[in-house]
Image (spheres, rainbow, N blue to C red):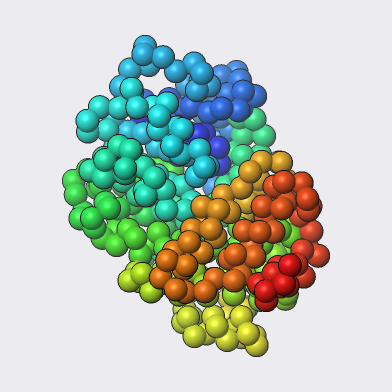
């Protein structure tokens, strides 16, 4: 199969690099010129907690795409949510009628992709591992699995699903294809999985962007931790009111437990949430973005939760506050700082 990975950053680079290492025919397409040049010169370095290897890859800038690159059987969309439509427009001429368009992105990007390429060509991929693009040509795996998902004793890194919940032959082929990059399983409940992951992202990502703290330090701070739980409660409530089975982001605890933790504290839940300091420090993706001066996906994560909440009448004051604060940081009106927790609290309470 011919595979294109459009957006070879942390997750796209992980998938593309491991697929190339497994002998698949892969083209990596990325807009960061230095990253492409480094991959062309010395390959892609895959490092972090799963070991280190350097993989020879074929990489180009989007401006280098031309008809000679031909048609692809699989398109993995690895760009930030706000670049999804532009990426698909660039790739339209390189898709055939049965190309699989796979989204391992954060957010609910199936809702952007399916109207452009058709629902029958769209496949969801919920990513539960974590990685960072640490330098041009270098992707570092920081967390083997970002959700407490296991099958047997193997942590699950990717969950793939059809939009209509069927387990089709192509879905099983996709799971086998992605397996070299991390243990991959199929699901009959893609939207439940997607909303459960959205709750995780809505909880941790904006807080990393707002405070500037790495993941473990963020979870260890009592005030930041409490606000994380409030964000998660909103996302779970909205998803459940839409009819999805949304798991609370802390495994083994209920929504009611999470609500207690958000209001008055819950020692057992908080201990599970914080966990032990990881061997390799990592930051949620929005935290990485603000440190690099890039736009974030806050409007596609917390903004998505808030938009659905408004539509069905579920209040989301904390998600609204998170969108406001992270947007101010993107505009340069604020810097990432733990002191922004006070502003989040004030805005969520109705202050300015």
Quadrant where the image shows the N terminus: top left
Instruction: Determine the image quadrant of residue 341.
Output: bottom right
Front-most of 147 and 232?
A: 232
Q: x and y percent of residue 288 in the render? A: 66, 47
- Say which residue appears at 77% left-offset and 70% top-offset: 342
Residue 91's spot in the image, x, y percent?
38, 27
Residue at 35% of width from left, 65% of height from top? Answer: 192
As drawn, 285 above or below 237: above
Asked whether the viewer can see residue 341, the reply is: no
Asked if one can make out residue 351 in the rendered structure from this viewpoint, the answer is yes
Residue 214 vertical placement versus 232 (above, below): above
Residue, x 71% and y 41% (percent of image)?
293
Given residues 186 and 55, the one toward you in this image is 186
Placement of 108 over or under 32, stated as above or below: below
Residue at 58% x, 23% y: name it.
36
Q: Position of residue 150 (x, y in %)?
A: 41, 64
Q: Nearer the viewer, residue 107 or 183?
A: 107
Q: Is residue 3 left or right of residue 343?
A: left
């Amino acid at each position: 199969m011919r595979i294109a990975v459009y957006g070879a950053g942390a997750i796209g680079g992980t998938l593309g690099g491991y697929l190339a290492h497994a002998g698949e025919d892969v083209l990596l397409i990325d807009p960061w010129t230095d990253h492409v040049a480094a991959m062309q010169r010395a390959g892609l370095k895959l490092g972090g907690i799963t070991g280190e290897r350097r993989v020879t890859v074929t990489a180009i800038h989007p401006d280098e795409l031309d008809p000679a690159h031909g048609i692809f059987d699989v398109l993995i969309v690895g760009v930030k949510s706000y670049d999804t439509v532009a990426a698909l427009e660039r790739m339209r001429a390189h898709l055939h009628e049965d190309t699989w368009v796979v989204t391992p992105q954060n957010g609910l990007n199936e809702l952007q992709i399916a109207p452009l390429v058709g629902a029958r060509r769209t496949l969801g991929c919920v990513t539960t591992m974590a990685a960072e693009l640490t330098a041009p040509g270098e992707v570092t795996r920081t967390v083997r699995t970002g959700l407490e998902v296991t099958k047997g004793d193997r942590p699950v890194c990717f969950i793939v699903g059809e939009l209509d919940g069927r387990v089709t032959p192509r879905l099983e082929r996709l799971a086998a294809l992605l397996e070299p990059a991390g243990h991959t399983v199929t699901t009959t409940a893609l939207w439940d999985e997607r909303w459960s992951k959205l709750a995780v992202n809505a909880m941790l990502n904006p807080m990393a962007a707002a405070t500037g703290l790495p993941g473990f330090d963020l979870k260890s701070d009592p005030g930041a931790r409490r606000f994380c739980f409030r964000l998660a409660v909103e996302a779970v409530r909205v998803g459940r009111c839409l009819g999805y089975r949304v798991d609370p982001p802390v495994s083994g605890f209920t929504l009611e437990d999470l609500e207690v933790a958000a209001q008055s504290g819950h020692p057992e839940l908080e201990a599970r949430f914080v966990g032990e300091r990881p061997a390799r420090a990592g930051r949620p993706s929005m935290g990485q973005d603000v440190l690099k001066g890039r736009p974030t996906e806050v409007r596609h994560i917390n903004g998505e939760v808030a938009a659905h909440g408004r539509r069905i009448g579920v209040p989301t004051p904390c998600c609204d506050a998170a969108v406001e604060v992270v947007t101010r940081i993107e505009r340069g009106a604020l810097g990432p700082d733990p002191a922004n927790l006070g502003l989040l609290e004030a805005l969520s309470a109705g202050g300015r």
